[in-house]
Amino acid sequence: AQKVTQAQTEISVVEKEDVTLDCVYETRDTTYYLFWYKQPPSGELVFLIRRNSFDEQNEISGRYSWNFQKSTSSFNFTITASQVVDSAVYFCALRSMWSDKLIFGTGTRLQVFP
Amino acid sequence: EPEVTQTPSHQVTQMGQEVILRCVPISNHLYFYWYRQILGQKVEFLVSFYNNEISEKSEIFDDQFSVERPDGSNFTLKIRSTKLEDSAMYFCASRTPPDTQYFGPGTRLTVL
């Protein structure tokens, strides 16, 4: 069975703090894809990043960075110097190579206070 | 930048009524999806559609649901006889290789 766990239900930080959102996944597949999506208060789902299971290189995009570790089945997301506009629900998702569906975690609500 | 669009943004209906949710996927995409999100919960897969047929569906996608691509641009989700528990946000998504699903803004369905 495939599963995505986001143990942090809600995180509150003050602006300019760094924050890490955890994601742990379960799959028996050797080839799979991991994703992060952002859901701001307006409700849409905004794609942030996709990672293939065979590429463990970490990625940085501006204030965002992702740490993919197959050994611990984790794909964590760090926001550096958080801003109020980062306030949203963040979803981690998994897709097997053999399936067409995204399996989402329960999401982490991030609140950044000024 | 191309995006997935959905109409209406909010639909209110009476229990037992039929509803059709509409989506216009990104124009060169070949794979289409519907997901739903009950308020405050996680996003759940309903169905995927490729080459004019369903390629995968979840247990949620029972006989009351159907999908259609009536023309070259629209992709619809029909719920035949709505129930209270169908109240949710419904997201359409589309993709073309490599493998990133882009989501529309969602349709909030309220069943009274």
Image (cartoon, coloured by chain):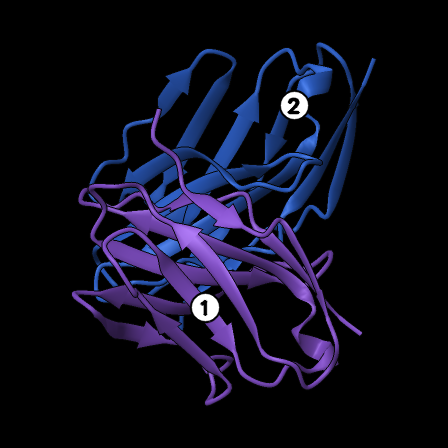
Chain colours: A blue, B purple
Residue B74 in the image: state x and y as whole percent. 34, 55
Residue B93 in the image: state x and y as whole percent. 40, 51
Which residue in the structure is indicated by mark 1?
Answer: B77
- 2 and 1 marks on the same chain: no
Residue at the image point whose x is 20% and y is 41% from the top: B28
Q: Which of the image's four quarters has the C terminus of chain A?
A: top right
For the question of whether residue A23 can be seen, the reply is no
Residue A26 in the image: state x and y as whole percent. 42, 61
Say which of B108 and A65 sits in front. Answer: B108
Residue type at numbered disc 2:
Asp
Q: Report helix, strand or loop for mark 2.
A: helix
Query: With respect to residue A65, does A7 lie above or below?
Result: below
For the question of whether residue A102 can be seen, the reply is yes
Q: Chain of mark 2?
A: A
Camera-nearest label, 2 or 1 = 1
Residue at the image point whose x is 72% and y is 59% from the top: B39
**Res A86 label:** 2
Query: With respect to residue A106, does B105 lie above or below?
Result: above
Residue at the image point whose x is 30% and y is 64% from the top: B69
How many residues crowd mark 1 within 10 Å: few (<14), some (14–19), many (20+)?
many
Q: In this rendering, would B54 be left or right of B86?
A: left
Gap in angstroms between the C-alphas marked 2 and 1: 32 Å
Residue B17 in the image: state x and y as whole percent. 65, 81
Q: In this rendering, would B75 be left or right of B22?
A: left
Q: Furthest-bottom residue in view? A: B63
| Residue A75 image-quadrant placement | top left
Q: Which of the image's four quarters has the N terminus of chain A?
A: bottom left
